[in-house]
Amino acid sequence: MDLAAHVDDRSPRGIAATVARLVRGGDLRPGDRLPTVRVLSAELGVSPATVSGAWQALAAVGIVTSRGRAGTVVLPPPASWLPPRYRDLAGGAPARLDLSSGTPDPDLLPLIGPALTRVALQMPSADTGAYLGAPVVPALEVLLRESWPFAPQRITVVDGALDAISRTLERVVGYGARVAVENPGFPPLFDLLDQLGLERVPVTLDRQGMRPGELEQALSGGARVVVLQPRAQNPTAVSMTATRARELAGVLRRHDALVVEDDHSGEIASARDVSLGVHLPDRVVHVRSYSKSHGPDLRIAAVGGPATVLDALVARRMLGPGWTSRLLQHVLVDLLTDSASVEAVAHARRVYFARRRALRESLAANGVVVDPGDGINLWLPVHDERTALVRLEAAGIRVAPGAPFRADAPAGITAVRPEPTTLPTDVPTARTASARTGHPCDAAIGSHVRVTVGLLDREIDDVAHALTLAATP
């Protein structure tokens, strides 16, 4: 490979970013030998120290290694155990500002230490009768039922939202079944469906959520489960409205299908808690995760829905993990009731809202218009995904490529080798693209990147300027 021909930015960071992209895209494979420092510096017209700095940066993050006289070679990916789309979102060259992760700002999470101390004082010894006890501690079930958007027949807790979705799907559909999903949607969900041998049926979104007409087509085509995110949808940040919930419920009444709702950002979202369970309580499994509001490492998600589904889910877990740690459940109860923790979550919700608004206003001042959305993500239309990533990496900013979020794209598609979804030549800017498609989350035209405001620092205007340059041709 002529590596020099792929380098646009000849700084150490730019050279490292180019190699990282080529590795992620499969153009450079594990074991491939990179040009020597002397050869590449001569081809690029830079000093050997510049190339050496790039090689050192790549070695520091585990992308390459030096083998002395044998040269510098590409290493196998350190996270080869990750599913395909997770790998597409992970890793990359070092960045000054990482806005790619989709994770909450750790400084905005409630303090878990005091909660652990209080729970330890209340529970001085382990519960030795836990094996046949109820899977949910009573205090937590009371809190969940009081705050649930509809009256579920059963409530339980599992080890995260994907665990809840996986166990639900395993109970209600078999290999080869069709599942209606949001497009764009959550990449790990697509990996999960692939692992289970289930067929994705993409349904696009507008400002109010899933489009009823497309959901009708998906259900008429044989989809028997619908998976959707009612608030702060990842990646588009769209929240389902009450009106749209009624419209979708009307569609579902004409078909025999189960709905799985993934409310992953509920506690830090500003939108109302809207659920199809209000209209179809016997056909909706609602999942509420506490990862973004109280901490990913709690690994707790609550699940509420019909007894026929939840009883089977709990019975299967009894033959596996058994239950979600009751100790952690008591910690969550403490976090949900302690005044300081409650205020910390409310403060986080306000900060995320303010960050989104500030970034959106700064983008608008630069001529790029995006919808307000909710939660910690922003879905930015760009003219060309690969070019956008290159420009942002050159500015020291990492964002998530848009391609892995597409439900109609195969696993392994990355921003380095995207599908041909760039805008028509008569659409010169991201603002025009947004107006032309009707909504930035429309996946039918154009490319996108996802920006995480959860990790956004105070450099709003600088970030907005870099995003603007990335969004335009």
Image (cartoon, helix red, strand yellow):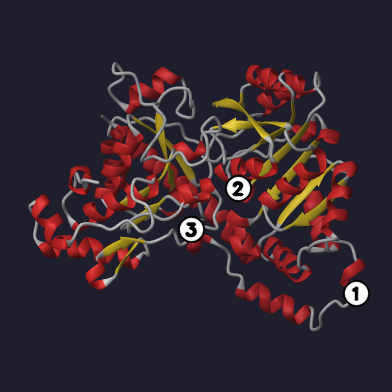
Which percent across, then down, holds residue 91? 41, 56
List the single residue furthest toward the front: 70
Compared with residue 75, is residue 368 higher up or lower down, i.e. above or below?
above
State the image quarter where residue 322 is shown.
bottom right
Q: Secondary structure at mark 2?
A: loop
**In front here: 79 or 275?**
79
**Residues under labels 3 and 2: Cα distance?**
13 Å
Q: Secondary structure at mark 3?
A: loop
State the image quarter where residue 66 is shown.
bottom left
Label placed on residue 265:
2
Is residue 149 shown to the viewer in this render? no
Chain-order first, disc 3 or disc 2: 3
Q: Which residue is mark 3?
A: 105
**In front here: 86 or 6?**
6
**Residues under labels 1 and 3: Cα distance?**
37 Å
Image quadrant for the C terminus? top left
Q: Amino acid at mark 1?
A: Gly
Q: Amino acid at mark 2?
A: Ser
Q: Total number of numbered labels?
A: 3
Left or right: where 335 falls relative to 258: left
Is the Cβ of the residue at disc 3 closer than 8 Å to that at disc 2?
no
- Residue at 38% from the left image edge and 46% from the top image edge: 26
Compared with residue 83, is residue 36 higher up or lower down, i.e. above or below?
below
Chain-order first, disc 1 or disc 3: 3
Q: Secondary structure at mark 1?
A: loop
- Residue at 73% from the left image edge and 75% from the top image edge: 119
Classed neighbour count for the residue bearing mark 3: other residues with Cα under 10 Å, few (<14), some (14–19), many (≥20)? some
Q: Which residue is mark 1?
A: 129
